[in-house]
Amino acid sequence: MSFTLAGSMSSTTTKSDEIHRIEAKWRERWEADRAAFVDTGKPAGEGTYLLVMLPYPSGDRLHVGHARTYFLTDALHRFLRQTGVTVFCPMGWDAFGLPAENYAIQKGIHPRISTLANIAAMKEQFRAWGVLYDWTKEVTTCEPEYYRWNQWFFLRLLEKGLAVRKKSAVNWCPSCLTVLANEQAEGGVCERCKTPVVQRELEQWFLKITDYAERLLEGLDTLGAWPEKVVTMQRNWIGKSTGADLDFAIPSLGETVRVFTTRPDTVFGATALILAPEHALVPRLLDKHPKRAELQAWVKSVRDQERIAREAEGAEKDGRDTGVKAVNPFTGQEIPVWIANFVIASYGTGALMAVPAHDTRDFEFAKKYDIPIVKVIEEERKEEEEEDLLRREEGEGRAPGAESLGGSTASAYTGEGRLIASGPFSAKSSSSARELIAAEAARRGIGGPRVRYRLRDWLISRQRYWGTPIPMIHCEKDGWLPVPEKDLPVVLPADAPFTGTGGNPLEKVASFVNTTCPRCSGPARRETDTMDTFVDSSWYYLRYLDPKNARAPFDPAIAKEWAPVDQYIGGIEHAILHLLYARFFARILKDLGLVTFEEPFSALFNQGMITRQSPTGRVEKMSKSRGNAVSLDPLIAEKGADAVRAFILFLGPPEKDSEWSDEGISGPERFLWRVRATVDRFLQAGSDPKGQPAKVDTPAARARHMAVKRVTEDFRAFSFHTAVAHLMEFHNHATSLAGDADADVGETATTLRTLVTLLHPIAPHLSEELHERMGGAKSLLLSGWPAFDAALAVEEFASIAVQISGKVRAEIRLRRGSSEKEAVTEAESNGIIVKWLDGKQRVKTIWVQDRLLNIVVK
RNA sequence: GCGAAAGUGGCGGAAUUGGUAGACGCGCAAGGCUCAGGACCUUGUGGCCUUUAUCGGCUGUGGGGGUUCGAGUCCCCCCUUUCGCACCA
């Protein structure tokens, strides 16, 4: 050891040499000892299974913006392991997807080559960061050993009727040249490239997640350890509505059109029937129209519109009267049939009854096109409100009643009330009329009560190469047939041409496309679409448990031991993508008898993003494309992994976004060097590093208990930034103890050992090194976590605020547990308090044990 | 527009959930050590005022009201920011 005190460091080069020496040494140790501390055997009692979001093996090196989730997970992993919990913390690769394929088109490098290279680079980065994963359980989704089980699951879903091929209006991304799931086209833009999507009517493969809508909704109530925000987002996405289906007859066509409404109580006010331009009946409705061609052109233009433009806020409502009449089944009156852009084809039946008087959208539409507005709900107001309204009207010099109480014609009244002009239902309340009218519809065979969801089926077809081939074969004679299970996996051909033009490269690989029909053995074609990569990540957490299993996706017995995931960590961006699909898949797996749970992730933690000012001047998410990324590799090379880890964890509450500051790292960096200096100074003095304190209840012992308590609770609460702060405080105490010539050597040794142990989840390399110098025989990962005694985790003396009428005037120090009487006596001997009490009459005193004494005076 | 979260020094952020606001760190200032320093060490640091000095005073958590002995924390109104949803009948 050539270095003694941090203060004597004369060159940063020697500093970083020292860091590298220590970090390299411990990386090797952990690797060599892996079997000892990475225990993936059966959980001993309270088995905690910890997980990270799958990282995407992107072409770029990971930067500071990516690091938080890994450091956070590793700190938690190490902490739990130190406390004796058996933890399984695996890592794998969500390796399929568009970026690798686009890279292949640009550079001519096969996606598999670039992906595997990226994976190797990332593993090397993880090693340099000191994050521990059990690499014996690594999973790579782009390898046939993995994706064959995607295909296997697809066949199971097909058998159960949960995988279907159907034609429907789907989202098409003109930039990615593929269809997308509804979840990947949120807000009308492609999730990956932000290009506005357009609707296309195509036949595609879907997984029937809608069959599970209710179960997915119910399960949300059990997710108490999930961020409320994510639960709410999923609830809204599933979008349950209760109402009724009603059939409207179109006598001239001999057809009925079914609509869904949440307000069957307003049916007597339905003055039009409005269909989405995509509605199946539209061509026939236009058939006899005098301006048929013009209307057809309009319908086409609406359908071709980008979703974002059509659905944008304030988008003008646009419609056309078909001239055809429908019959309101409750009033018996003829009403016009319209086609309008604001009716969404894929929700409900793609048709609605317009009740302009009681729906703002219908109202707006009716105003524009002069559709009758018939009021059928009378608002019930409380007396005060009526009086209030009356007063307002009088005040404005209008005749009372000019503004009718049930709602004016200036807007729709969308609230509840009492029915009027509704035949036999008049005078009923909205809520009872809803049920009565729905029941009446059921009785008459024209609909009935109905629950609907916004959730759409999961479109999994992708017209791209780099994904799991969908194991289906199309025969001219026998139609669509599954690939026989014995022929799995359907392997991606290695020789596809990546030209970027002419659609999916798979279509051009004759040896892949051309096959024989499993039924008639005649010539047939393989499906060339591949699966959405979210299929891969829907069950990978189970494959981690049993990654080499060649006979099943995983062993249900092992899954029963470990799953569901105890703690899941990932970004908020997957709130309704991955996390919804994985919940859906868990239910499928349960129904297949492979797992016993429905909720795959018992607890979820969403870490916030790291932000930084970008060249545009805005503070935004750190990313290479925004030009505000800070490279991690050089930073770690200069400061060491421990300092970078400590700083990133110190930035702020991990669930919130934190702004990166280039200077801030010096705080945690200096802290780590000071810890090292303190331990070295102690050892240089020749003190016994294994010494034990002479007495139990000492101020130093209390400081230790307090530090252990705080840091332990911080880690349990994911409050890593305060854990670092509390470690700094504890170090400040340890320094003064180490510098105190009168201090008990055993006491100091114990304090330093405690400090180093608590520091390990934050700065694993340095803490291991110092632990060893202090005589630790085993890795800190195996050395246990110090216990604390809550009774000792407080200072012996309390400083008590003395208030006069609620204002702090003085502070007194008393032994903890002192009585109110003692506090009053002590306060009365305090000069300032005496002055404040002088000439005043005491009203009462309020005493908060060990905290505060408030003397109220007049 | 609807919903949710948040607003604390020059900055990042603490605050045992109604009990001494500003922990910890950055930055800044003074001093030390240095040939020197952007290294390291020590001390100070919300604002305003006051004192020769001290155990001094006032004010202060977006703004305004309220409850309470006591409010960053609870209640009401308003402002601002961020995020989510956004024609789902």
Image (cartoon, rainbow, N blue to C red):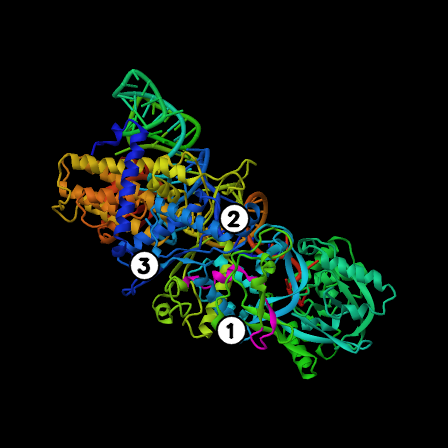
Crowd around label 1: few <14 · some 14–19 · many ≥20 (10 Å) = some
Q: Residue furthest bottom?
A: A443
Which residue does the numbered mark 2 point to in the structure image? A109
Residue visible at 70% across and 83% down? A444
Chain on which label 3 sits: A
The answer to which of A706 and A485 lies nearer the viewer is A485
Residue A480: image quadrant is bottom right
Which residue does the numbered mark 1 point to in the structure image? A484
Kind of residue sitting beneath label 3: Val
Left or right: where A705 falls relative to A428: left
Kind of residue sitting beneath label 2: Ile
Q: Position of residue A152 (x, y in %)?
A: 48, 69
Identify the disc placed on residue A87.
3
Chain on which label 2 sits: A
Is A651 magenta? The answer is: no
Q: Secondary structure at mark 1?
A: loop
Kind of residue sitting beneath label 1: Pro
Q: The N terminus of chain A is located in which quarter?
A: top left
- The span picked out in magenta is A517-541
Residue visible at 29% across and 34% down? A17
**Residue A413 vertical placement versus A77 (above, below):** below
